[in-house]
Image (spheres, rainbow, N blue to C red):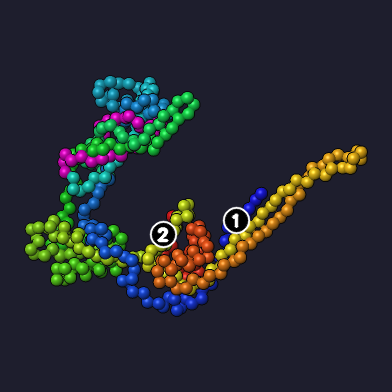
Amino acid sequence: MSRKANCLLLVIVLLISTVASAQTVDPIRYDAPVVRLKDVARVQGVRDNQIYGLGLVVGLQGTGDGSGSRANIQMIANMLESFGITVSANDLRLRNIAAVMVTADLPTSLRTGDRLDVTISSIGDARSLQGGFLLQTPLQAANGQVFAVAQGPVSIGGFVVKGGGGGAQVNHTTVGVVPNGAIVERELEPYDFAEEGLVSMVLLEPDFTTAARLAQVVNEVYQSNIAWARDQGTVDIEIPTQYLRNVVGFIAELEELPIRPDVNARVVINERTGTVVMGSSVRVATVAVAHGNLKVQVQSNTIISQPPSFSGGDTVVAREFTLDVEEEPSQFTVIGGTTNVQDLVDALNAVGATPRDIIAILQAVKAAGALFGELIII
């Protein structure tokens, strides 16, 4: 039996695009929440920096790199030579050691002696880092300078058990962490985020409207034109005279200011999972959608042909095939110019569309020019 199910027929007709697109929607009706300034922006210069290093994890129970992985063997030979022991890399056969990359993010707020977590990732053919110990590994930045040194026991948050012809595995066993495993040895160069009496706030989602609202809120709170939008992603704020010796306090006040960020009209589609997420500002012009299902069913029936008695014939077994085509009644629905996402969802549900059908419908509506918003497929 074979079935061709859910054959989606979409007929998208733009009916009143001029009228629908001319509708004026008050931005206040968008469902954008009022949030703190610190939730949508950061202070320019306050950021993390990536550091990395090449290290060795020892103490594994035969789950380390094999002889085909030359990285750890050469690293071990170099380490032994630093201790005055000369061993040829060709003579080493080790399964209890794994070569790993050690990575971390170094915030500007950390000082010499502070600790931070590091991530350990195998770069060879090791099967598991369970129970391993990371040897002292210098961590450098892109400029080649060492900013931290990592060492400690590796935690993978899982395990691998094998035996008796079977096994079990929980989580990814070739990537782990060393909690508080790195010690900061060099501080990042301090950034004067109050240079020339200005503090710059960088929006996490650059937008002209949000930048203008941010500047307006600051000016209203401090009753002075001390803030202005430099571009869609940066707002410069002049530090009031009374805060020149308390810049941190001024920034703390700024971060708590309420702001309503602008909502971009976006529809995000995940085709792998059938997930559709639509922003509250998405608008659809009036369109007509025809949705129906076509089912094709092939059945096989067994037919036995029995010859008459004493005829000398043989019993014959044959198969008879029947073809059945069934089409459900087509549902033709007009989706008007919607004012919110709920109207759009209700209209799509009215035609009996599944999440995957909705994906196809939205793509077709966008192609017809009736979906006013950005369509993102991930």
Q: Residue 231: x and y, percent?
A: 27, 66
Q: Is residue 235 left or right of residue 320?
A: left
Query: Compared to 219, does 316 lie above or below?
Result: above
Tell me which segment is drawn in magenta.
Answer: 111-139
In the picture, the disc for residue 30 is none
Q: Amino acid at mark 1?
A: Ala
The answer to if 134 sits in the magenta stretch is yes
Q: Is residue 2 left or right of residue 88?
A: right
* In-front residue for pair 346/161: 346
Q: Is residue 65 visible?
A: no
According to the image, label 1 marks what residue? 5
Q: Secondary structure at mark 2?
A: strand
Residue 40 spot, x, y in % from top left: 27, 60
Indicate the amino acid at tag 2: Val
- Position of residue 313 relative to residue 3, above or below, is above
The quarter of the picture where residue 338 lies is bottom left
Q: Which quadrant is the C terminus positioned in? A: bottom left
Q: Position of residue 140 (x, y in %)?
A: 25, 40
Gap between marks 1 and 2 measured at Cα: 25 Å
Compared to residue 371, the image places residue 172 above or below, namely: above
Going by the image, does 247 lie left or right of 106?
left
Residue position marked by numbered label 2 in the rendering: 277
Note whether residue 170 is visible. Answer: yes
Q: Residue at x 31, y 60 (%)?
A: 205
Dot 2 surroundings within 10 Å: few (below 14), some, or many (20 or more)? few
Q: Is residue 104 magenta?
A: no
In the image, what residue occupies the spot 30% across and 33% down? 154
- Whole-percent x, y for residue 87 in the image: 32, 21
Q: Quadrant of residue 88?
A: top left
Q: Nearer the viewer, residue 53 or 89?
A: 53
